[in-house]
Image (spheres, coloured by chain):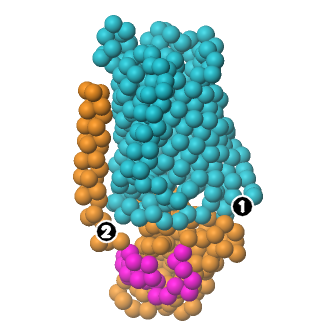
Amino acid sequence: MRLNFSFLFCLSAIFVVQLALVSPSVSLACASCGSGSDDPLILWPNEQLKSYLGVSTSNRFETVDTQGRLGRESGPTSRDALTLALGKALRNDLFMTVTLPFQQNRLSGASLRSVGDPLLAVRWTWLLPDFTAPQQPQIQLMASHKFAHARSQQEVGRLDLLDAFGTGLPETKLGVDVFWGQSPIKGGFAVGALFPEERILGRNSVFAGNGLRSTATLGLSLGGYNKVLAGVVREYREERRDGGRRVAGSEVLAHSYFLTLDWTPANLQTLRFSFSDRGRILTNKNMIAASAFSVAWLSTWE
Amino acid sequence: MNLINSFLGALAILQMTTACSKATSHHSSDSQPVAGQEQIVRGKIFSARIVNWERGPEVSGDTLNDINNACVIEVTRADGQTPTSLTVLDVFPYMKVHGHGAPDEQITTAVEGSRIRVAKIAFTMSGEWELHVKATVDGQTEEIEIPIRVP
């Protein structure tokens, strides 16, 4: 079933307004876009040690070709993941996180498991939120590196591709994250430059092309630490290189949207429900469309 | 309210940049191969053209029995003459625009005069692929790429 973007947008807007009308509103500082669309775990300014335990499932895979046409693909029909992340504050304005996914590919009753690509991320808060100036945003500079641990489609040994778990390419991301989180209505944006490494995969040296990932987020406090966020992500990559040569028409353009609900059932404990749909809004090119749903438990230890 | 305006403004910019990207992406559409109508590919040593798809091209299934793409490739020398000897060294599919190939150990080839019959070609997704053919024609070896559109 394909859902129209405007329909989903209207539905989420009605949902947000409805919740706002029935919930007491508290102005709280909020770290970053916090939706998990860029990094799964974000520490708030007063948090020292925080963990993330999430389960997710992705399905409805469709290829999008160079002309933006949706098509079929073989291989797994569902990809599930158990994601563990740990974040530690190094200073009041600096924290780092380590993320490790464990993935499972499923196809017609068969499944295969593997450790995914680990992610190491660091964020420095250049401008801290100020309770006396709610209009002032929090500004963070972010840097992360994804290690290419999992086997890529170039390295598979099975016809059903169940053993493909990653891109095979390490990637560094540098960016900025701006968020206005001290009002009941929250919002922000993040922009990250993507720098993949060139690697020999299969027969060729492969370079996926440098890219830019932009996220725009709008959210609403639901009282206490509860909030709901919705956003749009745009990812662009320049033409890839294959065997040292640029591949004409290989630019990647991917748009996705996400909806996230953070619910705090107990002090320092948060349950996060997220839905995202990739490749089915706006224009897309040379990517895999997919839908994903995740539930995560975030726990602050210090 | 300023926040909402800012967000809507960001979305508008996003939409505009997307429209620009869309407009600039159309230049490649004319050169895309049409399924079943692959053009002749000219190399320095030999030229090749798919003259017949016995099955496919189509997205393959997940078992050996579900990989059914088979085609016949006609090979000529660069000067247009029929080769006197033809040896196939390697045939494999590759999707350059996505940067990956597909399992190819199951591919079979058979030379029939100046034609190569290739079977069990796996295409793992729709889109623009290349079928790489490495062959020795009249004592000289070359590898060429035949573009294929898989619907």
Most foreground residue, B92 or B76: B92
* Rendered colour, chain A: cyan
Residue A147 falls in which quadrant of the image? top right
In the displayed structure, A4 sits above or below A93; it is: below
Q: CA distance from mark 2 to mark 1?
A: 36 Å
What is the x, y in percent for residue B74?
Answer: 47, 87
**A198 magenta-colored:** no
Which region shows up in magenta? B33-58
Question: Mark 2, chain letter?
Answer: B
The local crowd at label 2, few if under 14, some if 14 to 19, many if 20 or more residues have their Cα within 10 Å, is few
The disc at residue A108 is: 1
Most foreground residue, A269 or B99: A269
| Chain shaded orange | B
User: Badge 2 is on which residue?
Assistant: B29
Identify the residue shown where x is 75% and y is 57%: A110
Identify the residue shown where x is 24% and y is 47%: B16
Identify the residue shown where x is 30% and y is 31%: B4
Element assignment for label 2:
helix
In the displayed structure, A22 sits above or below A117; it is: above
